[in-house]
């Protein structure tokens, strides 16, 4: 990646911006990253009902264009959405995440249970740290009243587990459930990683039935998210409460033969119109709105979807 010269009509009026422009233009801006992504997994058939699964992988991520080349502190947070201004870093290395997964697949009649554990060590994790660039700090304080963050490399660890359960409750009623939990920390300081999702349980009950002699599938989904209290103090991250949602879906097949297939699907997300903000939601920066500046942006309320699908 490469970038041309920076410039601003504020150079003559603001010495701090002039310093940022001069430093950026004098630096080496061209950079190439050479990375190797690789994964391997093996499965041991322990018995007729049990498989043991082991996986290892390495995955890389080069810095994005704005993580390197944002020479002026701006609210471009690359998904962090923490409300801070950010400035780029031309010295960034690529991230390298190495992960190990261990799990079991257990089957009994129509049921399957699959627990998984994972541990991910991330070298040169790209995240925000308080800027030590005096010129950038002056500009950000003037524009937003806050000291900016700068993209930096550090090390981090993310570990967690998930559990998948599926099976037939009755001949025409099936249950699927997925539970997950994860925990992330920086290695350079004693602080949580920003925007790590809390524990979650998603359960779906599917009923296969008929309406007017035509096949129909009804689904009821429960989505539960726990409170997140393990938050980043460095980035002034607030804790969030847990919440529960209910979704329903109906799929009605009007025509189904070798020549054609006609289906109608109706879905209602957030059936009870729950007001909530996921922990991974962004932080509002806009004044004079229903959401206060610094508060998490709430998710959508009740949503209705109706679709028609015809195959011929």
Image (cartoon, helix red, strand yellow):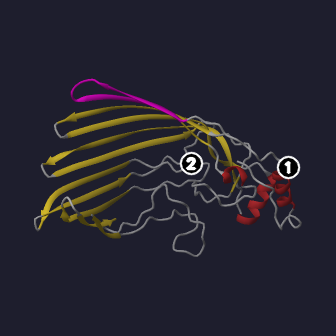
Furthest toward the left, the residue is: 213
Picture coordinates of residue 95, whole percent (x, y): 61, 39
Q: Is residue 270 visible?
A: no
Q: Is residue 97 visible?
A: yes
Picture coordinates of residue 110, whole percent (x, y): 18, 40
Looking at the image, residue 310 sits to the left or right of residue 142; the answer is: left
The secondary element bearing badge 2 is classed as: loop
Compare marks 1 and 2 and give the one earlier in the sequence.
1
Which residue is found at the position 70% from the left and 47% from the top? 1
Looking at the image, residue 51 sits to the left or right of residue 256; the answer is: right
Q: What residue did someone put label 1 on?
A: 26
Query: Can you say whether 133 is above or below 304 in the image?
Result: above
Which residue is found at the position 16% from the left and 47% from the top? 169
Mark drawn on residue 232? 2
Number of on-image labels:
2
Mark drawn on residue 72? none
Residue 53's quadrant in the figure?
Answer: top left
Number of other residues with Cα within 10 Å of mark 1, as a class: few under 14, some 14 to 19, many 20 or more: few
The secondary element bearing badge 1 is classed as: helix
Which residue is found at the position 58% from the left and 67% from the top? 293
Q: CA distance from mark 1 to mark 2?
A: 35 Å
Which residue is found at the position 14% from the left and 52% from the top? 172
């Amino acid at each position: 990646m490469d970038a041309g010269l920076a410039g601003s009509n504020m150079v003559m009026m603001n010495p701090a911006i002039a310093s940022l422009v001069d430093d950026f233009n004098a630096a080496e801006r061209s950079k190439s990253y050479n990375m190797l992504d690789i994964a391997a997994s093996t499965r041991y058939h322990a018995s007729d009902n049990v498989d043991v699964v082991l996986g290892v992988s390495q995955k890389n991520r080069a810095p994005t264009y704005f993580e390197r080349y944002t020479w002026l502190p701006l609210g471009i947070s690359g998904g962090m959405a923490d409300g801070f201004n950010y400035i780029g870093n031309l010295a960034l290395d690529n991230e390298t995440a190495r992960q190990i997964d261990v799990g079991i697949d257990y089957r009994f009649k129509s049921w399957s249970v699959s627990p998984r554990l994972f541990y991910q060590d991330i070298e040169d994790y790209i995240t925000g740290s308080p800027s030590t660039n005096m010129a950038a700090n002056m500009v950000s304080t003037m524009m937003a009243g806050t000291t900016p963050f700068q993209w930096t490399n550090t090390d981090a660890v993310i570990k967690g587990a998930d559990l998948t359960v599926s099976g037939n409750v009755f001949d025409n009623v099936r249950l699927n459930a997925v539970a997950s939990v994860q925990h992330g920390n920086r290695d350079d300081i004693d602080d949580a990683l920003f925007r790590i999702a809390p524990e979650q349980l998603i359960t779906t009950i599917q009923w296969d039935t008929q309406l007017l002699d035509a096949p129909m599938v009804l689904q009821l989904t429960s989505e539960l998210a726990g409170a997140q209290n393990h938050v980043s103090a460095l980035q002034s991250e607030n804790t969030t409460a847990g919440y529960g949602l209910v979704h329903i879906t109906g799929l009605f097949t009007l025509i189904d033969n070798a020549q054609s297939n006609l289906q109608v699907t109706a879905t209602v997300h957030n059936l009870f119109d729950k007001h909530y903000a996921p922990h991974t939601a962004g932080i509002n920066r806009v004044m004079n709105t229903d959401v206060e500046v610094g508060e998490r942006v709430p998710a959508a309320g009740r949503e209705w979807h109706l679709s028609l699908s015809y195959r011929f």
